[in-house]
Image (cartoon, rainbow, N blue to C red):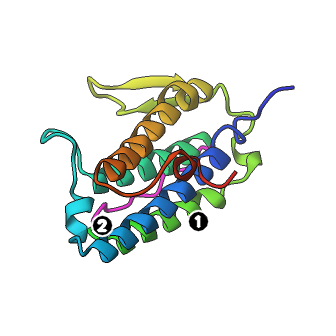
Amino acid sequence: MTISLYSASVPVFQHSLKALSAILSKAEAHATEKKIQPEALLQSRLFPDMLSFTRQVQIAVDFAKGASARLAKIEPPKYEDTEVTFADLQALIAKALAFIGSITPEQIDGNEEIEVVLRPGTEKEKRFTGQSYLLTYSLPQFFFHVTTAYGLLRHNGIEIGKRDYMGAL
């Protein structure tokens, strides 16, 4: 039995974005309960040259919507990445979930061999087949940023664990 390109993409992104939304809620509740300024968590980093928690969430969303759109052969929506609050990040995730939820299996399945070109015409141009784009680029990037967001919250004392990261199964 084979797995479809759709099954390996959209539902995976949806599941992890929902889990990310749930840990955002826990982080906001923790900040309120402990009287921590939300910005302290939203702008947290493990090292000065690292992207902030907020940026990790934005990039995870970018990979979910971008990969889903490219595999469906449609233009990815552009989001401004102006989020500064927990509510803003929740709205961003909800917007991405609505977008990727509108993509059907018929739009993606069968596109394993399409050509996906990132940064066309630049020195950083990358070319993939649809399948390699998902499996060797998009999913690893997506999970890197979701995991980093989780790790930043855990590092800052939010009481979350593996079950929170994994989401509802």
> Residue at 26% across / 23% down in the picture?
123
What separation in Å lies between label 1 and label 2 (alpha carbons)?
18 Å
Q: Which residue is mark 1?
A: 98
Do callouts 1 and 2 mark residues in contact (Cβ within 8 Å)?
A: no
Residue type (three-letter) at the residue carrying disc 1: Ala
Residue range (magenta): 72-82
Q: Of helix, strand and loop, which one carries label 1?
A: helix
Q: Which residue is mark 2?
A: 83
Q: Residue farthest to the right?
A: 1
> Residue at 32% across / 55% down in the picture?
157
Which quadrant would residue 19 be assigned to in this image? bottom right
Q: Of helix, strand and loop, which one carries label 2?
A: loop
Q: Does residue 86 appear to the left or right of 45 in the view shown? A: right
Residue type (three-letter) at the residue carrying disc 2: Glu
Q: Residue farthest to the left?
A: 48
Kindly report which numbered mark, 1 or 2, lies closer to the viewer in this rendering.
2
- The x, y position of residue 85, in whole percent, is 30, 71
Q: Nearer the viewer, residue 34 or 31?
A: 34
Which quadrant would residue 114 be assigned to in this image? top right
- The x, y position of residue 149, in whole percent, is 37, 48
- How many numbered tags mark residues here? 2
Q: Does residue 92 appear to the left or right of 41 in the view shown? A: right
Rendered position, 132 above or below 55: above
Q: Earlier in the sequence, mark 1 or mark 2?
A: 2
